Image: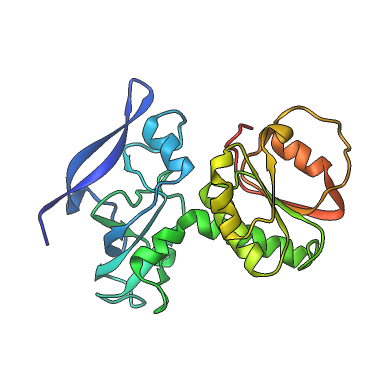
Amino acid sequence: MTDTFTALVIEDEAGKPKASFKQLTFSDLPDHDVLVEIAFSTLNYKDGLAVSGKSRIARKPPLVGGIDLAGTVVESRSPEWRTGDKVVVNGWGLSETEWGGYSRFQRVKSQWLVRLPDAFSLQDAMAIGTAGYTAALCVDSLVAWGAIQPGGKEVLVTGAAGGVGSTAISLLAKAGYSVTASTGRPETHDYLAGLGASAFIDRASLAEKGAPLQKERWAGAVDSVGSTTLVNVIAQTVYGGAVAACGLAGGA
């Protein structure tokens, strides 16, 4: 292995987060029990906030950014993992309080690791990434709640052209649910229709302050926008329906 490697490090500079590429050594990494050679990570909305310094996502600088990673175990002090194992990590405070995936190598805790199924490549895993995982959790929650039915009343997906929204549409449509996509970019309609969206609404129609109770429209919804959009979505959800809210792209 190389003695040094490149990582995107977020530091505190005059009270503000600043990201830059730096050369690290293995002694710089956290003293966790599994060393992973990283093949892929993803760029999430939260990563963008952290790297740009627009929000203090990285709460314990200096640290390496990147909310997830996929790679190969190269050293392990854990009996659960061997050299050569293909693994994925997402969550666990990566890029917030723990060092993340924007590095060629990273040391992580053994309990954070998920073994990569044979059906997926490392690239596949990060093509899905944290956004896809979040979308799957949202859809699973709506199904478990029993609020949505295949072929039944429409399910709304906000932020439809984003990572969470795109994956949610695909999962819902393939399972037989009728999906309405909310987006402010008409040029994405063909793309979203290809994923399975059957109808579209302009995001502006949900962005303005509305009445506390509105006409019932949605059996359920996956919302990654938050703010006034989430308020309106809830107000338009049918009695007994459910909304899986997972983001604040539009603000708190």
Q: Residue at (24%, 45%) from the top-left corner?
A: 7
Please say if 12 is above or below 83.
above
What is the image's colouring? Answer: rainbow
Q: Residue at (76%, 54%) from the top-left corner?
A: 220
Most foreground residue, 230 or 197: 197
Q: Residue at (42%, 78%) from the top-left corner?
A: 119
Q: Quadrant of the N terminus?
A: bottom left
Q: Is residue 52 left or right of residue 34?
A: right
- Residue that lies at the very extreme toward the top in this rendered image: 14
Most foreground residue, 77 or 179: 179
Q: Is residue 90 left or right of residue 80?
A: right
User: In terms of image quadrants, where is residue 155?
Assistant: bottom right
User: In terms of image quadrants, where is residue 54?
Assistant: top left
Q: Is residue 22 left or right of residue 59?
A: left
Most foreground residue, 48 or 184: 184
Q: Position of residue 236 (x, y in %)?
A: 83, 43
User: In terms of image quadrants, where is residue 118?
Assistant: bottom left
Q: Position of residue 23 (x, y in %)?
A: 16, 43
Please say if 240 is above or below 202.
below
Q: Quadrant of the C terminus?
A: top right
Please say if 90 is above or below 215.
below
Q: Position of residue 111 (x, y in %)?
A: 43, 66
Look at the image and tell me whether residue 6 can be seen. Answer: yes
Q: Is residue 226 left or right of residue 36?
A: right
